[in-house]
Image: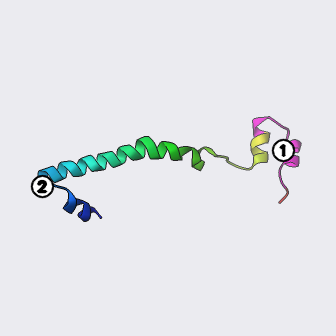
Amino acid sequence: MYAWIWRHLPGPFAVRLILAVVLAAAAVAVLMLIVFPWLEPMLPFNDVLVGSVATATAVSGAAGWADAQAASPAP
């Protein structure tokens, strides 16, 4: 793939090298500015939960231990 791109770039070695760097920078810019921001909300990195829902509810103080146990699904 890279050899095919290199063969199709015009000019001598220095021009090809500059064009290759520009193409790589453009690819990185498209990924960082368009693709990754579009994809980020679909990734599960913000859905972090340590323990079970019942433990998290009981520890947070939103409900008592009995309420948390009643709300959790039975195994």
Q: Is residue 7 left or right of residue 42?
A: left
Labelled disc at residue 68: 1
Magenta segment boundaries in residue numbering: 59-73
Q: Secondary structure at mark 2?
A: helix
- Residue closest to the eye, 56 or 27: 27
Residue type, numbered disc 2: Phe
N-terminal label among 1 and 2: 2
Q: Residue at x 20, y 56 (%)?
A: 9
Quadrant (top left/top right/bottom left/bottom right) for the N terminus: bottom left
In the image, residue 66 above or below residue 10: above
- Residue furthest out toward the top: 61
Is the residue 6 above or below the residue 63 in the image?
Answer: below
Residue 64's x, y, as percent? 85, 38
Camera-side mark, 1 or 2: 2
Instruction: Find residue 38 and name its label.
Output: none
Per the image, the residue denoted by label 2 is 13
Looking at the figure, which quarter contains the C terminus? bottom right
Q: Is residue 51 above or below residue 62?
A: below
Secondary structure beneath disc 1? helix
